[in-house]
Image (cartoon, rainbow, N blue to C red):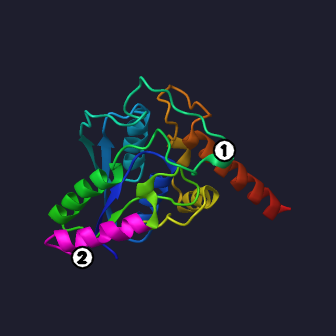
Amino acid sequence: MSNSRAVVLLSGGLDSTTTLYYAKSKGYKCFALIFDYGQRHRKELLSAVEVAKRASVAYRVLRIELPWKGSSLLDTRYALRVTRYEKIGHGIPSTYVPARNTIFLSFALSYAEAIGAKAIFIGANAVDFSGYPDCRPAYFRAFQKVAEKGTKASRIRILTPLINLTKEEIIRLGIKLGAPLERTWSCYAGGKEPCGVCDSCRLRAEGFKRYRRGKDERVI
């Protein structure tokens, strides 16, 4: 895959950062696509830009507007619901943004076709995730058919290398690849510091906890 171009959706979080470094490790020339879509956790944009710069890849910040809101990530009048850890992933949370991945992938597909990219990478995960319907393998299989039927290029692949990994495994992979995970941002709340209680914060914390525990067990 040396010198093949790829568009990488980059949010600034653990998963997308690991995905960017994974794509680079496979020899792709990466073009990061960062979305400013009115999210309350806008600090992730700063992390995404920093990650792209550290990875020495070209990046674009694309500003779009979703005036109908439809999510607690877009409308700060609604509080983020706190879910018990063991219940995360059961049901669709208030942070779900209607058709977000469809919107993002559509832009990425247009970008990929315009620059002659062979692939689109997205850091979706269907194991330790919040229950979003557009993060499931069946969804990406369906969008692959859209890419094949709806573009002139018709051979752009939608790649989800983290889809079946746990958060611990994603962290382990990111560290192995040298991804700057310490510079990533996961919190949904939109504050200056991570809230520690939103789904994303808790999944991140549990992933690092399991990673450290597994590391210690191997040392012993």
Q: Position of residue 66 (x, y in %)?
A: 26, 37
Residue 76 lies left or right of residue 194; in this view the side is left
Q: Nearer the viewer, mark 2 or mark 1?
A: 1
Q: Quadrant of residue 166?
A: bottom right
Task: Label 1: state its secondary structure.
Answer: helix
Q: Which residue is mark 1?
A: 85
- Measured in 3D between alpha carbons, the distance from the residue under mark 2 to the one under mark 1, in whole angstroms, is 40 Å
How many numbered marks have been drawn onto this rendered protein structure?
2
- For the residue pair 95 and 6, the one nearer the viewer reads as 95
Q: Which residues are magenta?
A: 138-158
Residue at 71% over, 48% down:
209
Q: Position of residue 104 (x, y in %)?
A: 30, 52
Q: Amino acid at mark 2?
A: Arg
Q: Position of residue 211 (x, y in %)?
A: 69, 55
Are circles 2 and 1 on residues that touch, CB within 8 Å?
Answer: no
Q: Quadrant of residue 7?
A: bottom left
| Res. 10 visible in picture | yes
| Res. 180 visible in picture | no
Q: Which residue is mark 2?
A: 155
Outermost residue on the right side: it is: 220
178 up-or-down from 144: above or below = above
